[in-house]
Image (cartoon, grey):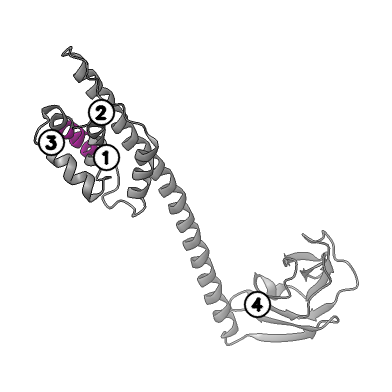
Amino acid sequence: MTTEIHTLVGAYVLDAVDDIERASFERHLRECDSCRTEVHELSETATRLADNTWSVPPPWLRENVLSEIGRTRQLPPKVDAAPPARPAARWRRFTAAAAAVVAAVGAGSAVYVVQDQRVREEQRVAAAARSDEARVRAILSAPDVVLKKQDVSTGGRVTVATSQLHNAGVVMLAADAVPTGRVFQLWTIRPGGAPVSAGVLHEGQAADVVVLNGLPGATDVGLTIEPPRGSATPTLPMVADVKL
């Protein structure tokens, strides 16, 4: 019997041993009272630690635990003849294994929080997209919808649909690409007022569908080519000016 087999206590409790190691260690347990005691104590501790985790742990948590166990060096038992040495060594091994469990659960919790936040954000974006799509369909199918179209001077077309019933409009842009380092920017123009930005497209983006609340009160929807991130005022001449 070698001293190293004693160090398998923590891995055995956490089911981090292969079939050969498990069979060897279980044969060893039949002969070693101290290891049987450690297995019993560490099993209880692992169970208590698990009480504060998820009722259904993520599938990657076991891999995290095994990785932490592999990086955590467990102390071998002392082989001194003096009786007090064995309990001290046993307690150090017990503490090291328990610390590995805590570290692994903590690391798993942090990753779970990040992934949960990411999933929630993706769900929020998807819900917003469905809401926008429903809004577009409602405006386009409104009984009072009015469609206006205007060619873009650089190629393409802007179509604007407005509905008094919904007090909103939909701007649909399908244009040719702008030069590198430039972007399209939409504007609304109201009687007696200065043009107001209605959205800046990303670099390389030449198509978009935008819902604008209160659009029936505007007289024009304009389109200009601007520097990245847009401009505070339109760069003239506009490449499209849809009269509403």
Would you say residue 41 sits in the magenta stretch?
A: yes
Disc 2 crowd, CA 10 A, few/some/many (<14, 14-19, 20+): many
Image coordinates for residue 92, horizontal then vertical, percent: 28, 23
Q: What secondary structure do most residues of the magenta stretch adopt?
A: helix
Q: Which mark is residue 29?
A: 3
Real-space Cα separation, disc 1 to disc 4, in angstroms: 62 Å
Quadrant that contains the N terminus: top left
Segment colored magenta: 39-49
Q: Nearer the viewer, residue 220 or 179?
A: 179
Amino acid type of the residue tagged 2 in the rendering: Phe
In this rendering, which labeled residue sits more in front, label 1 or label 4? 1
Residue type, mark 1 in image:
Ala
**Residue beneath disc 2:** 94
Label pair 1/2, CB-CB below 8 angstroms: no
Q: Is residue 85 above or below residue 183?
A: above
190 relative to 127 in the view: left or right: right
First of labels 3, 2 by sequence position: 3
Q: Which mark is residue 11?
A: 1
